[in-house]
């Protein structure tokens, strides 16, 4: 059957067809929809969200050793978190076929860096496959399982945002049912004490030689002979951009990216007058090709920064003298206001940041919707490095640079459970004087609303235990743990002010859900009484998208505020900070300060 | 081969139904038997950011993204976003946009300004513009969320697919209880396009 699928939907379909038994992940753009699709469409596969990528990977190892075909997915930076099991699993090899999806994010559409994870496969000495459209995304899952079992190695399926989130036509196949092998005890292979690991490293080196041979022979690395004297070596989405520009030259398309088919490449280069490498991000092919003594260019013409595009490839081809002309835009781009993402109207994260801003303390930050507080007009967050980093950052900063008003670390519920718990343990152990604000909106919102250990529901929709964050923090040894309603601005300000001044670590946990996920929260909206509004702009500075400037001006020509009743969730935060009490519940008396 | 490809860019702001519109368009092209690719970057879109969907179809489509200056049609659900997107438009390309005005908080900050009349500016540059009070028309039809399908109706004449195929695609992609009203919105869009002399200009 033909279907129109995104790369991620196609990987999910591929998992079904390959006979995957277990799929585990922690969400992360652009990988998230793979597991969501598996859980939604193919419940015959056991799927789960783990608290973080390392655990997901380890769950996957267990399933593979248990004899089942296994899929583990994550975004590129997730593999940093899972790098420890990843590197050593490369030594032990697998039981059932094991596929690790690394979804990279060139251009950083929703990420903190654009690391090129093809190097991870080389680093661990394991093969990786790289699809260039949805059809290949599906087909490569099964191929990866077969390669994994044939060579006794985990296999990486390397996706990028454009492959994961673009749709194309996919011809679907029939699911297979691989034989269940069960767990075969083998301590020499699976227990990596040094004496065993040394022997396994030798196996890895031998395996690499076999993989090298496979890479030269496999149809995953194919030559497209159009009788041209120009040859392009490319893979992934760059292949499509190149084909758009040069449909009729010759190609060596790399689908099996480590180890590279260097002999095939050498032959291809020899048989063409000019050969170019077109690859997105780092010179991964190029370094190895040049190291093999084959002198052709790539990054000289195509930047290693950001995403490639048909346009950027055209510019590079022109510079390389392959094409004469680049079609330029007919119309000049407009310089307009930006439209950055913002915290939603009524977002429970808003008032805690207003309070922190008022208290003028250093705020180490973390990753989630709340990171948007760094943007104007809130502009409050001093660091954002990686998930869980806020707590460690605050500890270090406070040790060398204690602030008289205190030091705050801000972290979301999913992020705290992902990698914040150990940071908090450090704060207790090392007697840190920080206040950790856990913005518990009961969902993993940034990535589109996934469940986590605090929400009481599994990926497959079963009810489960909810971790109790207050008890958890207390058990770690934090003596001062407080819960606060983030819609009560004054109460939030008060508790933060007190806790920040206290010696020793303290935790403040907010207790209102995200207004978008899993359910939309909508109460009676607020409105501005124009006669009372003095144009002070205080409400503009809290960054609620429901509030904007009206056409009405004050005597001093300052615009008055207006609230869009369709967007306002009735959270009341703006009303609480409006000095002239101009913001009131629609057709009801003012509610101020609670 | 390159020339038989049609490129349609759909733009709007998070929550305006850009993705449903591009799904319906893709489904139509698929029912006709064409190759299709479609690309959008989601992630931050739910938080009021710009949403852009590239749809390409023809005998054989490689890249899922439309190069600058190559869109045959731009469909926009917000007037300033229409203006922002012209970099993609082909020389004689058509822009169909709603007059919807969504002013982001940043434009209330005093640092940035939302243009007074983005459509007037658009018309000084681009010759083929259809601008509609799509919000108002959608509301008259019974649901403000119909703007996306209404605008697909407006541009449908440009693509030459049969109305019945469009309708089949809508039936396949829209939730059953909203199918009838969406078919109505689509037909309304077609009718408005016929009245508008810009299409044939
Ligand atoms: C290692 C790693 N994994 C995944 C992500 C993707 N990611 C960014 S924020 C986030 C979760 C945010 O959830 P939460 O902390 O609850 O904050 P919320 O968005 O709900 O406010 C995820 C999964 C990432 N950036 N890094
Ligand atoms: S999705 Fe939820 S957590 Fe994210 S900004 Fe909106 S309300 Fe806040
Ligand atoms: S009450 Fe005020 S701050 Fe809250 S959603 Fe409505 S306009 Fe925004």
Image (tube, helix red, strand yellow):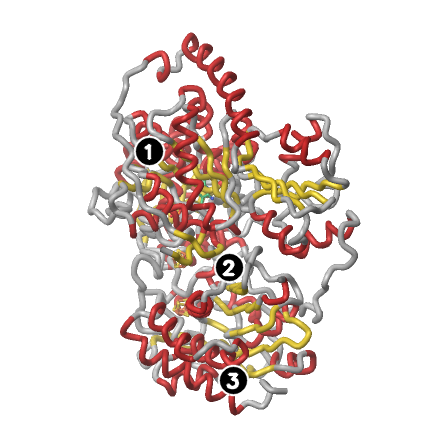
- Displayed quadrant of residue A453: top left
Q: Secondary structure at mark 3?
A: strand
**Residue of label 3:** B132
Of residues A7 and A303, the one nearer the viewer is: A7
**Closer to viewer: mark 3 or mark 2:** 2
Q: Chain of mark 2?
A: B
Q: Does the beta carbon of the residue at mark 3 sit less than 8 Å from ligand 3?
A: no
Residue at 41 percent of width and 26 percent of height: A150
| Nearest to N terminus: mark 3 or mark 2 | 2
Q: Chain of mark 1?
A: A
Q: Is residue A548 above or below residue B129?
A: above
Is B11 above or below relative to A141?
below
Left or right of A467 in this view: B30: right
Q: Residues within 10 Å of mark 1 (few under 14, many from 20)?
A: many
Q: Nearer the viewer, mark 1 or mark 3?
A: 1
A9 sits to left or right of A213: left
Residues at discs 1 and 3 both on one chain = no
Give the residue at x 31% y 52%.
A511
Residue found at the very far top of the displayed protein:
A195
Q: Return the mark for residue A69.
A: 1
Q: Is residue B196 left or right of residue B143?
A: right
Q: Chain of mark 3?
A: B
Q: Nearer the viewer, residue A337 or A575?
A: A337
- Tell me the number on the disc at residue A486: none
Q: CA distance from mark 3 to mark 2?
A: 28 Å
Q: Which residue is mark 2?
A: B37
Quarter, ligand 3? bottom left
Regarding residue A570, the answer to whether it shows in the image is yes
Residue A449 in percent (x, y) is at 36, 53
């Amino acid at each position: 059957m033909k279907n129109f699928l995104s790369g991620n939907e196609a990987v999910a379909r591929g998992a079904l067809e390959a006979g995957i038994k277990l799929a585990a992940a922690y969400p992360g753009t652009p990988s998230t929809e793979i597991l969501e699709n598996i859980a939604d469409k193919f419940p015959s596969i056991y799927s789960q969200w783990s608290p973080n990528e390392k655990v997901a990977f380890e769950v996957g190892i267990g399933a593979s050793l248990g004899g089942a075909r296994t899929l583990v997915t994550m975004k590129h930076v997730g593999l940093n978190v899972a790098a420890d099991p990843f590197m050593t699993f490369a030594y032990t090899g697998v039981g059932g076929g094991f596929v690790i999806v690394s979804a990279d994010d060139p251009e950083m559409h929703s990420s903190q860096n654009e690391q090129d994870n093809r190097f991870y496969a080389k680093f661990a000495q394991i093969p990786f496959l790289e699809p260039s459209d949805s059809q290949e995304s599906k087909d490569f899952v099964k191929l990866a399982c077969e390669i994994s079992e044939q060579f006794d190695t985990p296999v990486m399926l390397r996706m990028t945002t454009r492959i994961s989130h673009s749709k194309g036509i996919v011809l679907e196949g029939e699911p297979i049912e691989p034989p269940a092998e069960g767990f075969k005890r083998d301590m020499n292979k699976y227990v990596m004490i040094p004496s065993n690991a040394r022997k396994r490293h030798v196996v890895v080196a031998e395996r690499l030689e076999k993989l090298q041979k496979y890479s030269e022979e496999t149809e995953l690395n194919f030559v497209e002979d159009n009788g041209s004297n120009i040859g392009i070596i490319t893979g992934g989405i760059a292949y499509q951009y190149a084909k758009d520009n040069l449909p009729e030259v010759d190609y060596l398309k790399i689908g099996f990216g480590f180890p590279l088919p260097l002999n095939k490449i050498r032959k291809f280069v020899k048989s063409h007058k000019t050969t170019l490498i077109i690859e997105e991000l780092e010179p991964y092919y190029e370094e190895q090709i040049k190291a093999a003594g084959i002198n052709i260019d790539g990054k000289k013409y195509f930047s290693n920064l950001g995403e490639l595009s048909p346009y950027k490839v055209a510019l590079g081809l022109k510079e390389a003298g392959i094409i004469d002309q680049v079609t330029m835009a007919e119309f000049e781009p407009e310089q307009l206001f930006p439209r950055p993402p913002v915290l939603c109207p009524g977002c429970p994260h808003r008032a805690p940041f207003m309070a922190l801003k008022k208290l003028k303390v250093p705020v180490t930050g973390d990753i989630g919707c709340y990171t948007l507080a760094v943007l104007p007009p809130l502009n409050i967050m001093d660091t954002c490095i990686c998930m869980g980093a806020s707590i460690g950052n605050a500890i270090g900063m406070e040790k060398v640079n204690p602030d008289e008003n205190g030091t705050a670390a801000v972290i979301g519920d999913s992020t705290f459970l992902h990698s914040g718990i150990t940071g908090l343990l450090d704060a207790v152990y090392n007697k840190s004087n920080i206040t950790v604000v856990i913005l518990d909106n009961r969902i993993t919102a940034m990535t589109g609303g996934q469940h986590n250990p605090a929400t009481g529901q599994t990926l497959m929709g079963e009810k489960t235990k909810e971790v109790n964050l207050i008890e958890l923090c207390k058990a770690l040894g934090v003596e001062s743990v407080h819960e606060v309603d983030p819609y009560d601005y004054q109460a939030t300000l008060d508790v933060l002010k007190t806790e920040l001044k206290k010696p020793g670590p303290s935790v403040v946990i907010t207790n209102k859900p995200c207004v978008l996920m899993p359910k939309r929260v909508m109460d009676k909206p607020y409105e501005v009484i124009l006669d009372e509004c003095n144009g002070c702009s205080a409400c503009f500075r809290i960054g609620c998208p429901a509030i904007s400037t009206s056409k009405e001006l004050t005597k001093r020509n300052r615009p008055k505020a207006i609230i869009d009743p369709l967007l306002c969730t009735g959270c009341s935060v703006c009303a609480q900070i409006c000095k002239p009490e101009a913001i009131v519940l629609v057709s009801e008396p003012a509610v101020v300060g609670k | 081969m390159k020339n038989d490809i049609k490129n349609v860019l759909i733009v709007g702001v998070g929550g305006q139904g850009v993705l449903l519109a591009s799904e319906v368009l893709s489904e139509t092209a698929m029912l006709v038997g064409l190759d299709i690719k479609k690309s959008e970057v989601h992630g931050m879109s739910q938080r009021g950011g710009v949403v852009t969907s590239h749809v390409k179809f023809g005998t054989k489509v490689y890249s899922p993204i439309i190069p600058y200056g190559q869109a045959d049609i731009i469909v926009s659900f917000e007037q300033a976003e229409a203006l922002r997107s012209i970099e993609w438009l082909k020389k004689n390309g058509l822009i169909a946009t709603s007059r919807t005005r969504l002013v982001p908080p940043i434009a209330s900050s005093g640092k940035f300004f939302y243009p007074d009349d983005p459509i007037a500016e658009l018309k000084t540059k681009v010759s083929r513009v259809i601008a509609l009070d799509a919000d108002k028309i959608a509301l008259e039809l019974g649901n403000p969320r119909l703007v996306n399908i209404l605008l697909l109706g407006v541009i449908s004449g440009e693509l030459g697919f049969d109305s019945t195929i469009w309708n089949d695609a809508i039936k396949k992609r829209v939730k059953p209880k909203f199918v009838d009203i969406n078919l109505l919105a689509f037909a309304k869009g077609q009718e408005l396009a016929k009245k508008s002399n810009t299409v044939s200009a």
